[in-house]
Image (cartoon, grey):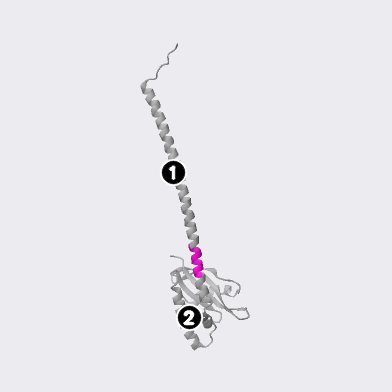
Amino acid sequence: MKKKKLQPLQKQLIHLLLIFVICVFGIIIWSVSDYIQLQRKNLENSLELYAGHLAQTVRQSYTSYENIAYSVAYNTLVQDYIQQTNSVERYDSYQQVYNLLSNTKKLNSYLADIAVLSSDGNSISLTASPSLYSCYSDLLSIPSYAFCSMGTLNIRGSNCHILSMPIHKLSTSGKARYLGTVFLAIHSDR
């Protein structure tokens, strides 16, 4: 019978050390892989939550601006001012509408300006000249557009996004008559 030769102690320790190193590397690779997957899932969840929050904020802001535009466009003071032909009464109406627009502007800190343009020339703006908004005059004659984005303008050194809504006078017959347009200038640099 042949006897099995025992390996020297040094070789056995080297084999054990190699097995230990392989096991440690395996555990490290598995741990790093698991950690990367966990971080990826956390990042995806965070981005999903952020996107959802951003979408909700945008919807709320849009609704807020739309409500402000509706409240100005269908306010009887504004509609009466736009239709006013007597210069003394127009001046009195101007003061009332200016106060209304000033108070309305305080509803949202991002509002840079509120302007009302009339095809008859009775226009008003809190911050800028109403003529600044005349670049949108070709779109103003379209009676079917609703609350919409018009683009951007520079108002007093601030880049502003412009939203607009037509002003219509509703009659008892159900017909609407176009009177003018409300413009909201929203700070986009903030």
* Magenta stretch, main secondary structure class: helix
Q: Earlier in the sequence, mark 1 or mark 2?
A: 1
Q: Considering depth in this image, is 27 or 159 the residue closer to the camera?
A: 27
When the figure is inspected, residue 85 is found, relative to residue 49, above or below; the finding is below
Q: Considering depth in this image, is 186 or 107 the residue closer to the camera?
A: 107
Q: Position of residue 95 (x, y in %)?
A: 46, 83
Q: Position of residue 39 (x, y in %)?
A: 44, 47
Image quadrant holding the C terminus, namely: bottom left
Query: Hey, what amino acid is under mark 2?
Result: Val
Where does label 1 land, which residue?
Answer: 35
Where does label 2 land, which residue?
Answer: 97
From where the camera sits, is residue 152 visible? no
- Taking 120 as reference, is 20 left or right? left
The segment highlighted magenta reads 57-65
Please identify the residue farthest to the top as the structure is shown. Answer: 1
Please identify the residue farthest to the left as the structure is shown. Answer: 10
Asked if the magenta segment contains residue 124, the reply would be no
Q: Position of residue 70 (x, y in %)?
A: 53, 74
When the figure is inspected, residue 18 is found, relative to residue 109, above or below; the finding is above
Give how far apart the Cα atoms at labels 1 and 2 are.
61 Å
Judging from the image, what secondary structure is the residue with disc 1 in?
Answer: helix
- Taking 12 as reference, is 60 left or right? right
When the figure is inspected, residue 132 is found, relative to residue 89, above or below; the finding is above
**Is the residue marked by circle 1 packed among few (<14), some (14-19), or many (20+) residues within 10 Å?**
few
Image quadrant holding the N terminus, namely: top left
The residue drawn where x is 45% and y is 38% is: 30
